[in-house]
Structures are given as C-alpha cells and as structure tokens.
Amino acid sequence: MSCVSFGGEGWLERLRAAAADPRPVAAFLSPEVTDAKVRRVRLLAESHDPKIRESAALSYLAPPDLLTVLAADENPGVRCCVARNEHTPSDVLELLAADADHGVRGWVAANPVVPLTALELLEADAEEMVRSLASWARGWERT
Amino acid sequence: MSGILGTGIEEGLLLKPVTYPWAMELYDQAVANTWFPNEIQLGEDLGDFERMTDEERHALTFLMSYFNPNELLVNKALAFGVYPYVNAAECHLYLAKQMWEEANHCMSFEYVLETFPIDRVAAYESHVTVPSMAQKEEFEVRFIKRMTEQSLDITTVEGKQDFVRNLVAYNVILEGIWFYSGFMVALSFRQRNLLRNFGSLIEWIVRDESLHLKFGLNLILTVLDENPEIATEEFSAEIKQMILDAVEMESQYNRDLLPNGILGLNADYINQYVRYLADRRLDELGFGAHYGDVNPAKWMATANDTLQLVNFFESTNTSYEVNSRA
C-alpha cells in the first residue's frame, strides 16, 4: 500500500538475523569527553549571541563552574537553559529557584534533579505557573 | 552571484563574503547545538515503560514507526531537492549540518527502539496497513521525485515553483506540522511523569527542528523575494491548498491511529493543535491564519518553536477528555 519500501519477507528475514547483531546502537558510546570539548563549551559560553550561550548552558559537558557563571547571565533565556540542564549542580539550582524571572524558576521546578529544598520553595512561589510545575514535579518517582 | 538558486558545480565555492547572513547564523547555532543520543540515559526510563499501559506503549511504538523513516525522507528531500539547486556556500554549510542532524535523529529513534522492548515489525506495520500513513508518504515522495527529473530547469519559473513546492512539502508540512504533532504526543508522556529521559531526547530533537524550520522558511521567502515572478495568484493558492490538504491528511492519520484516545489525548485534541500549527505556518508564509484555532496544548506553547515554559504543564489538571472517541 505504501509508496515507500516497507516490510516484505526479505526484510523480515534480515530483521530476524539482525536481532543477533552484537553492535546495537546503544553500544555506540557518545564520543569521549575530552578537555578540548569542554574548552569548546567554555568558548560557546563567551559568545555575544545569547542563542549560542544557551547551547553552552544546555550542554551536558558544561562543567559546574561554567554553569555557575551562566546562571548569572544577563539573558533570562540563558539562565532558563542552566535551570533545564540535568547536570546543573544542586547549589546552582537552589540559587536559580530564587531567580527574578519566573520562567527560570519554572524550569528549576521542571528539572528532574531539582533538590527537594528548592522544590519546597517553589511550591510557595508567587507565580501560579511555578507552583503548578512544582506540584507536577512532585509526581516523579525519586530515587 | 545572481541569487540563492543555481546548479553550477563551479559556483558557490567561496564562503566569504557571506550573502545570506541568516544562513550563517543558523549554521553557528546548529553547530553549537551538537549532541549525541547516548548522552541521555534512556535505560533509566525502562521502569516507566514496564509500568505503562498497552495503549501508552502503542503510542510510543507508532511514534517511532512514523518518525524514523521520515527523518530519512527529509534527508532525501534535502539531498535531491534542495542542496543541488542552492548556490550559496553558507546555505550548503547549514544543509550539511541539517543532514547530519536528521541522521542523528534517526539514530536517536533507533536508540529508543533498542532500549525499550518494542516490536519493530509491529512498529513499521502501520506504514503498510494504515492508508492515511501511506497517503502522507505518497504526498512527500511526489514532490521529491519531481526534483530528480531531468526535465526540471531551475532557471525557469516552473522549475523555481517546483523548488518551492518541495520546500513547502518537506519543510513546512512534514517538519513544521506533521513532526510537531508527533512531538506533542511524545512529550505528553513526560507531562504525565513518564519517560523523562525520552522527553529530554525529544527536546533535543525539537531544538534542532526549530532551526530546520527557520532555515526552510527563510529559504522560501528569499526565493520568492528574488524571483517575484513565480508568486502568481494561482501558485499562491496552490501552496495554501497544499497546507490545507496536509491538515486533512494529518487529521485522518490521527483518527486512524488514535481511535480511542491515549495519554489523555484524543484525535480531536491533536487535530486542533495541527490546525493551530498550520495557521502559524500560513502566517509565516504571508497568507494569514485560515482556521483560527487556539492552541489546545498550551504546554507546547511556543514563541519560536522551541519549547517554552509558559503554561508548559497547564493542562495537567484540565479536563480534556481521556479515552473519548475522536
């Protein structure tokens, strides 16, 4: 029925054979984290373009000291990205939980690694959106 | 250089001076956004997957079924229908990065398929058994195929119109409407406190896709600006109709694949979001909104098609119907 090539016995046979492939995609590790890569993220963080600084702030390779610097960025979009990053240290998230921008505080609440102390603070936030996010975040199972 | 369109192999080989700074800016942003699927620990979501209902697993399965081949279809549209006809080095840089991103998305979905116990045969079956899925693919393939025909001459009005048709089909419709409809369903798992790492993976993809959209729309608008003779009333009406037809196709597809509602969503809810998206795309192309629907998924509210937090989880406690028939 489809105009693109899908299915068929030949495909099924190859798919069954591939089930024994010892090289699943999941086995392909991300390229090694090198000093050069971290230096690149530091350079991105110095860009005059806030969109590029946002990328640095979202990077899983951004080291804690850099995330701390970016948490004080003048652009709220950059601070939102620090708040979203699951590798942002707890103390930085706690700092951002008191950010002047409610969007930043909201992303702290939505961060799966938000510290409980920050979450409690956000549950009493002046903005309803932040409070509802904090309430939603309570629904996650925490280890 | 006479404009953004051209097929000469010998031309467009020097980056400086940059003629289209918007392409260079998007390239810079795209490179800064570089990520790899395995940076996200999908395995941590396995517990959620095991707790999910059959319907929720079905939703994840058909999302993978839809996205994976279509990411590669976008690459064909770029390789056959865009890259050969664009003559600006900065655009080639961006397109090369975009093509890698589509490959990276394909690998991301493979990562999902390998991590969760998803039956691939069942996942891809819908391409063969669901007519509305096949109809969407036929629609895309028709425009890409035209770009590969020897008779296409990009220097003519007809050739330029074919170029724009292909761009509208793969960029505005496939990436800008149909993919976003799928993203909304994908992110609704997280809204229900499920599959947070999968949600992060989708967020990375949405971030890339938002740039793809910007590039495609800028390219269309530049071609129209440089070649005003192609924007006849008849052609404009045809482009608008393509988008309206695409909305109908997507609506039927959602009705076929979500007959009973899942994840607190039903086809009506998703289709309202599809019409809202279509209005945005029509507006970006200068047509103005057609449907006038409001965004039902405020948690997907966007200022620039990247995820924003404004009302992000607003619908958590709203009463849109669960399991109601579409």
Image (cartoon, helix red, strand yellow):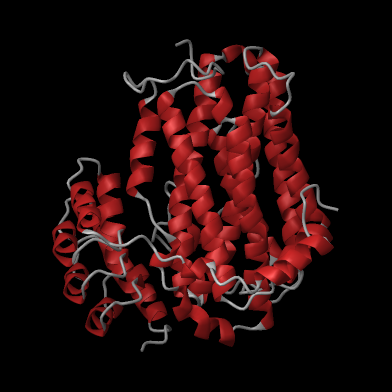
Residue B132 lies in what quarter of the image? bottom right
In the rendering, at what x and y percent does residue B179 appear?
59, 52
**Residue at position x 23%, y 50% in the image:** A40
Q: Is residue A93 above or below residue B67?
A: below
Visible residue check, residue B272 = no
Is B115 on the left-hand or right-hand side of B90?
Answer: right
Residue A88 as seen in the image, left or right of residue B220: left
- Residue B38 on image: x %, y %: 43, 66
| Residue at 66% across, 38% down | B169
Locate residue B7, reporting x and y percent: 56, 18
* Residue occupying image coordinates x 68% and y 66%: B62
Rendering quarter of residue B287: top right
Q: Quadrant of the C terminus of chain A?
A: bottom left
Which residue is rendered at x = 65% and y = 32% of the image?
Answer: B166
Q: Nearer the viewer, residue B14 or B229?
A: B14
Front in this rendered view, residue A31 or B267: A31
Tally of numbered discs: 0
Residue B304 visible, this orientation: yes
Image coordinates for residue B313, horizontal then vertical, percent: 45, 69
Q: Quadrant of residue B83?
A: top right
